[in-house]
Amino acid sequence: MTESDEIMNLYKTLIQSDQYTFPSKGKVKISEKHGVYIVYSPTDKVLHVGNTPSGKKGLNQRLYNHVTRTSSFSRVYLKPQNISLRNGYKYRVIEISSPRKRALLEALTAGLLCPAHIGTGEKKKK
């Protein structure tokens, strides 16, 4: 199997995986492993695709960063629209140990799903 085929298979697994609702309070408890995730609105609109480039608590930590508005996704997209992920927002995850495969899967997933927010690194004009 080629690397491209493997990443496409991981994408199919991710989008068919169980969908979870962010907790109304407390921490996110899904996995301390690294991986890729998709954040959805209550109406299943794709808002964000991300991965876990670092962090000891893996997916739990990254998703909790979004819930507590300490991530760039939260600051740039959620906060200006007064969105709280604790109000019925959902996510899917897949555990992937390889940093390269996480990066490739994140890129493919974002490209195919066209999330409402995609971090481009560009600074907002004031």
Image: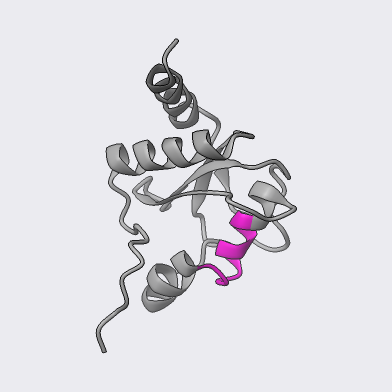
Please report the residue visible at 45 percent of the width from the left and 65 percent of the height from the top.
Answer: 73
Looking at the image, what colour scheme do you see? one colour
Q: Quadrant of residue 18?
A: top right
Please report the residue visible at 39 percent of the width from the left and 17 percent of the height from the top.
Answer: 5
Q: Quadrant of residue 2?
A: top left
Q: Which quarter shows the N terminus?
A: top left
**Coordinates of residue 59 in the picture (x, y in percent):** 64, 48
Position of residue 26 in the picture relative to residue 66 (left or right): right
Number of numbered discs overlaid on the protein picture: 0
- Inspect the magenta stretch and tell me whether residue 65 lies in it: yes
Magenta stretch: give its range: 62-71
**Coordinates of residue 70 in the picture (x, y in percent):** 57, 72
Does 19 sit above or below residue 43?
A: above
Position of residue 115 in the picture relative to residue 55 (left or right): left
Q: Which quarter shows the C terminus?
A: bottom left
Please report the residue visible at 32 percent of the width from the left and 50 percent of the height from the top.
Answer: 115
- Inspect the magenta stretch and tell me whether residue 36 lies in it: no
Farthest-out residue, top = 1
Farthest-out residue, left = 125
Does 59 sit above or below residue 8?
A: below
- SS assignment for the magenta stretch, majority: helix
**Coordinates of residue 116 in the picture (x, y in percent):** 30, 56
**Coordinates of residue 64 in the picture (x, y in percent):** 64, 60
